[in-house]
């Protein structure tokens, strides 16, 4: 039988892992790219792993040969591949800078053969009960119907220059007051075939954000 004595410590533990996030976020709480510039909403960035020799950037791909759509968010097998650029769209559409602990949509800046949204969403695999990140997510309209499509960013380090631009992506949406959600860090599931699928794990993927080049970008941008 679950008693109040067992429930309270569990609640405290969850609050330590995923503290409540208010709607107001300090303006100086920006997320930075690899050059120390604040991430801009609707600008293009590659999401790259901090650790070297453990895969490349993030892209989208079928889960396997028999499960094609929706496309899964995956990590490139080789470090030399930067993956596909993404956009970050904050819940507040007037917000121009991406901030820590702020609900946002993430979507690839690319069309796909599944003819669906390139926005990220969380789904539960019926066979394994794992929670994977796939495409097909809703964009905007925060609320119960779009609860699976909201993520946020937190710092990965404990401070100091080495960790200034290292981050984690988490799922714990704050867009629905009465919705019950399973919070978690976004990490990598390595499949038997070597593919690296993103999902909620106990081992978060530490990432950094590199401004993606446009054809008009100069070498100094």
Image (cartoon, rainbow, N blue to C red):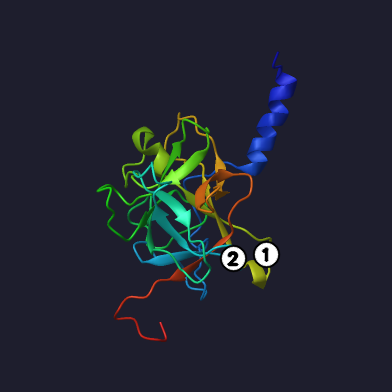
Q: Are marks 1 and 2 in contact (CB under 8 Å)?
A: no
Q: Is residue 43 above or below residue 10?
A: below
Q: Earlier in the sequence, mark 1 or mark 2?
A: 2
Q: Is residue 169 above or below residue 79?
A: above
- For disc 1, the marked residue is 159
Mark in front: 1 vs 2: 2
Residue at (47, 46) in percent of width and height: 23
- For disc 2, the marked residue is 50
Categorize mark 2 by other alpha carbons within 10 Å: few (<14), some (14-19), many (20+): many
The secondary structure type at the circle numbered 1 is: loop
Residue at (48, 73) in percent of width and height: 37
Q: Position of residue 174 (x, y in %)?
A: 47, 40
Residue at (69, 30) in percent of width and height: 10
Q: Position of residue 78 (x, y in %)?
A: 52, 66
Viewer-closest of 53 and 42: 53
Categorize mark 1 by other alpha carbons within 10 Å: few (<14), some (14-19), many (20+): few
Viewer-closest of 144 and 185: 185
């Amino acid at each position: 039988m679950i008693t109040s004595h067992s429930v309270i410590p569990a609640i405290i533990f969850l609050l330590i892992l995923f503290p409540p996030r208010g709607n107001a976020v300090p303006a100086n709480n920006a997320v930075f790219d690899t050059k120390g510039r604040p991430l801009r909403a609707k600008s293009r960035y590659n999401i790259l792993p901090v650790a070297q020799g453990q895969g490349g950037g993030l892209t989208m791909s079928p889960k396997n040969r028999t499960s094609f759509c929706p496309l899964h968010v995956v990590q490139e097998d080789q470090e030399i591949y930067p993956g596909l650029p993404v956009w970050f769209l904050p819940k507040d559409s007037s917000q121009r800078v991406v901030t820590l602990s702020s609900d946002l949509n993430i979507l690839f800046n690319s069309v796909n053969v599944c003819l669906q949204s390139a926005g990220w969403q969380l789904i539960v695999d019926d066979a394994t009960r794992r929670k994977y990140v796939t495409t097909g997510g809703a964009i905007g309209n925060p609320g119960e119907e779009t609860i699976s499509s909201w993520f946020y960013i937190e710092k990965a380090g404990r401070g100091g220059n080495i960790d200034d631009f290292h981050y984690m992506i988490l799922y714990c949406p704050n867009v629905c007051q009465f919705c019950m959600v399973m919070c978690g860090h976004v990490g990598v599931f390595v499949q038997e075939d070597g593919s690296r699928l993103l999902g909620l794990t106990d081992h978060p993927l530490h990432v950094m954000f590199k401004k993606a080049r446009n054809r008009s970008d100069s070498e100094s941008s």
